[in-house]
Image (cartoon, rainbow, N blue to C red):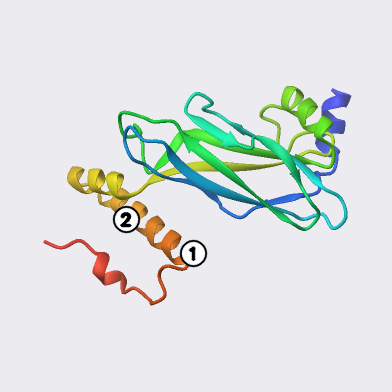
Amino acid sequence: MAAAEAASSAPAPERLLEVEEDEVVIDFKPNAKCRADLRLRSLHPSLPVAFKVQTSSPLKFLVSPPRGAVPPLSTASLRVVLRPQPHAPPSFPRSPADRFLVLSSLSAARLDSAVGGSKGGGGGGGGVSAVRLRVFFGGPYLLRLAADAGDAAAVRLVSSKVLRYVHRIGILSTVIDQSDFTERD
């Protein structure tokens, strides 16, 4: 009991890494490898930050590199690959089953001990912080499936995510009138 109280009163680990994306956005295409990039930013001013990425669906997703270190106040890019899937995800655009966990620490050894000892814990243990990411499936293929099924909510979510992504990467330089994307009779 005392150990549980000590663990709950321990200070939260310092945030060492920032993940620029709030979700892993997969442009889904059937029977094709689908890729998404994540950018990690070190928040520590003088030491490298070790990281390790885990997924709830290791048979579906690969992460490259799955672990490493980010130099002080620098960024690193990761690639998430969805292995070829013959069918659309059973629930899209957001998948309740597929998630990622980005663990970070100033010590790579702490990451390995945190993985075994704090699965499901709030922020990891012993100086390990964690960022949780959900998976968002989108792209033209799923947009068409949602439209064909008459799922207006999924159409809205997928199209808004596509617009935000296009705007973020700088392809879209003008303001788009949202009325161009409303349902028509």
Q: Where does residue 117 sit, x and y in percent of width and height?
A: 76, 23
Residue located beneath label 1 in the image: 168
As drawn, the residue found furthest toward the bottom would be 174
Q: Which quarter of the figure is the N terminus placed in?
A: top right
Q: In this rendering, is residue 156 above or below 82?
A: below
SS assignment at label 2: helix
SS assignment at label 1: helix
Labelled pair 2, 1 in contact (Cβ < 8 Å): no
Please identify the quarter of the rendering in which residue 29 is found. top left
Nearest the camera: 15 or 104? 104
Question: Mark 1 belongs to which amino acid?
Answer: Arg
Q: In the image, what residue occupies the spot 29% across and 50% down?
A: 140
**Left or right of residue 132, residue 146 in this image:** left
Q: In the image, what residue occupies the spot 21% across and 49% down?
A: 147
In the image, which disc is placed on residue 145?
A: none
Q: In the image, what residue occupies the spot 84% across and 58% down?
A: 45
Q: Which quarter of the figure is the C terminus placed in?
A: bottom left
Residue located beneath label 2 in the image: 156
Q: In this rendering, is residue 163 above or below 65?
A: below
- Specify which label sits upstream in the sequence, 2 or 1: 2
